[in-house]
Image: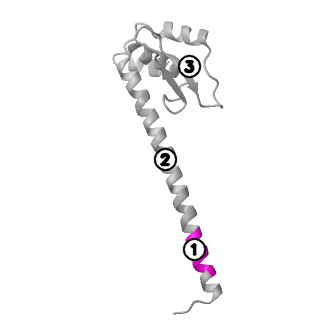
Amino acid sequence: MVFDSSSLNLILIIFLIVGVWLIILWSNTRTMYKHIHQVAQQQSVIRHGDDARSLCRAIHRLQPTVHAGIDYVIKEDGPDQNPYIAKWFNSSIPQPKPEELDEALSAIEGVNPMRDHATQRLK
């Protein structure tokens, strides 16, 4: 079976398109894996630390549309260190200032999120 040059060019273009498509899929899969890993890591930090959970609630009180692991990263350097915002990814929403966070932390102090969920939602 003999191919003429136009048939070979067509086959080459098809292989090139499939190759580029596979590279794009691979890149998107790796990016998605990194995001999932980062969100899971943040959920672990928030679940195991009361201070990190309070900081996350304070951030959510100030900026209700941001999410830990996607828009920002909370870090704890040690058991006797307070958690802090290590990275803020969302450029369209400003990062809360420390004094705003302190004010929000004092506002949510003593509030049980499980019991007072409906009250918080109304506010």
Image: magenta residue range? 9-16
Q: Secondary structure at mark 3?
A: helix
Mark 1 crowd level (few <14, some 14–19, many ≥20, 10 Å Cα) = few
Task: Name the residue located 57 percent from the left edge and 79 percent from the top edge.
Answer: 11
Give yes or no for residue 12 being in the magenta stretch: yes
Q: Is residue 118 above or below residue 7?
A: above
Residue 36 position in % (x across, y down): 44, 39
Looking at the rendered structure, the kind of residue marked 1 is Ile
Q: Residue 10 in the image: x percent, y percent?
A: 61, 80
Prevailing SS of the magenta stretch: helix
Secondary element at image label 1: helix
> Residue 62 has which mark?
3
Using the rendered view, name the quadrant where residue 96 is placed.
top right
Q: Which residue is mark 2?
A: 30
Which residue bears the numbered disc 1? 14
Which residue is at a point 51% across and 26% down the rendered structure image? 73
In the image, residue 106 lies at what x, y percent? 50, 6
Three-letter amino acid code of the residue under disc 2: Arg
- Mark 3–mark 2 Cα distance, whole angstroms, equals 32 Å
Of tags 3 and 2, the one toward the viewer is: 2
Give the amino acid at mark 3. Leu
Rounded to the nearest whole Å, what is the CA distance between mark 1 and mark 3?
51 Å
